[in-house]
Image (cartoon, grey):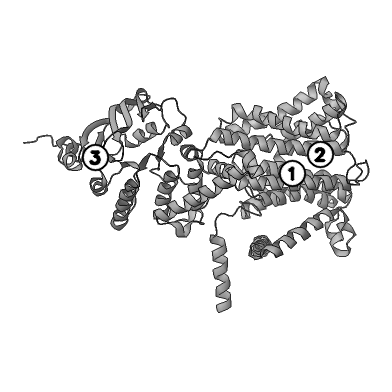
Amino acid sequence: MSLVLNFWLRVTSLFSGFGEQFRAMNKWQRYSAYGLGVVALYLLPYWPDVPVLGQIVNTPGSQFETVLNDQVVIFVLIALGLNVVVGIAGLLDLGYVGFYAVGAYVTAILTSAHGNLPWLLALPIAVVISMLFGVILGTPTLRLRGDYLAIVTLGFGEIIRLTAKNMDWLGASRGISNIKKPPSMFGLKFGVLDAKPYFYLGLTMVFIVIFILHRLEYSRVGRAWVAIREDEDAAELMGVNTFKFKLWAFTIGAGIGGLAGVHYAGKVGFINPDNFPLQLSILFLAAVVLGGSGNMYGAILGGILVAYMPERLRNFSDKRILVFGIVLVLMMVFRPEGILPKRVGNEHKKRRAKSQEGEVAS
Amino acid sequence: MSEVLLDFNNVTMQFGGVTALNEVSLQIKQGEILGLIGPNGAGKTTCFNVMTGVYAPTLGTVSFEGKNLAKLKRFEITKVGIARTFQNIRLFSEMTALENVMVGADARKKASVGGAILRTSRQRHEEKESRERSMELLQFMGISDRAETAARNLPYGYQRRLEIARALATEPKLLCLDEPAAGFNPAEKEELNELILKIREQGYTVLLIEHDMNVVMKVSDRVAVLDFGQKIADGLPADVRNNPAVIAAYLGVEDNAS
């Protein structure tokens, strides 16, 4: 047992050690590392063809690039959005699947059921409408705190699903089919069989979202969010318009959830209410918490793991959910702050520098 | 000492059957340091909470520069020019010292989500201004050497001073300090005294709640005393010190005074 624990600690410290080494690099080294990383990510669908690596990453029983797009990209997008709400602003949202569903349904309505718009035009409309739903849900409920907010949002997720299930206009339980695919662009054709173009599109969305969130996080807005998470009353007494910034966090989170829904609808071409169960909300939250709530890169890692591991472990068939559950429980016990916890200040850097000096001296 | 900055007019504050403040009238004048003292439970912190909008008074009005505070939200009161610290330290513990102060400085800034995403020139300018001003304040409070440390990892004395820096960052006209010397040793209290005087020199008006008589008597221009929610004295420190009602409140009255 202690052997396992020791190994685990080593693995996790490897992650954080990597981050610090990365920070220590100079500008050019860092940019080229970023560049290489981005290229490697866009080449992800081809990784299974690489000799040894391929054996490790490939998913048995399902097509690798389909897993990448339909699972990983969607989960990463959603983990990014949910991290704003839960991780940064500290608002526990248990109904996040609702926004995902709104994004998907708006796309379906506009491009198939009740309209004939192209996918590309439906995208901004769906994102805006998702954000609007964020405002609609947030305005009355953000006066609540903690557990109460969690319960209300939990209800919201279910309301969306049940409404879709019971309204003929929304296709009821039959769902909506023939949703338009993204148009061909940059030589990519979005067909039925090849998931790679969707993956490239989704990955690009992820990068855009990261860019936007990064700017928000290191600004007055990001500081207000963290201040609200840390102590809402004190934040308000320091002049933070807490309601406004909570609503923004909710809205931006909703927009990103909606974006993921648009991408999903465009890929699968067919949605029904069963695609948006409550269980997904829980998995989304698990992704954020597992990866490291409050740290964008932690949330991304969490999204990747939660989406990818069950597929990778498909050989264990039914038991994979059990394995996944055990991993989650172990995480909560041994590293409750997540795999990549948020780091504040420079203390840890100093400590590391000191311990390195010590090593050199001895 | 001229204009009245904050006017506490016949304020009564009731919580259910408990009357925490009973028809308290208190004026704070521009540029002074007013000490507010009283035994435990006298209503000092309630006074603060009414002022900063945490509670709405049951009766009476609080006005700041002639403006009634009753209709304002808490964050708006900060913008009007009242800032406070907390008796039990309430920093944003997962933020660095500098970020804590920047949250205060942000109160006067405008750039929001759009500005941050587009990095408009106004946003960049405000960001730079916030950062520089916050760093200055940390230097002023003598804690800039730990600017990049998470607030929760700061030593106690630093945390206390960081609270004052954060409050100053909101550019208040009136700074309310709620027991800033709590838990300090005599040498630290001495330092704090000087700091409070320095803050006043910079043009801030200070309202000071404090238990420690040495601190209050040395620093304050004027002292008001609360007991059981009522103001029992208000005057120069030396007068208040010798006021029989104050002595009685603090030491109790002998039953058979002869």
* Quadrant placement of the N terminus of chain A: bottom right
Instruction: Identify which amino acid the numbered label 3 is placed on.
Output: Arg
Instruction: Identify which amino acid the numbered label 1 is placed on.
Output: Leu
- What is the x, y in percent for residue A184? 90, 41
Badge 2 vs badge 1, beta-carbon distance below 8 Å: yes
In three-dimensional space, the C-alpha distance between marks 2 and 1, rounded to whole angstroms, equals: 10 Å
Identify residue for label 2. Answer: A263
Density class for disc 3 (Cα within 10 Å; few <14, some 14-19, many ≥20) is many
Identify residue for label 3. Answer: B222
| Occupied quadrant, residue B140 | bottom left
Total marks drawn? 3
Residue placed furthest toward the front: B121
Same chain assignment for discs 3 and 1: no
Q: Can you see residue A323? A: no
Residue placed furthest toward the left: B258
Q: Please tell me which of labels 2 and 1 falls first in the chain.
A: 1
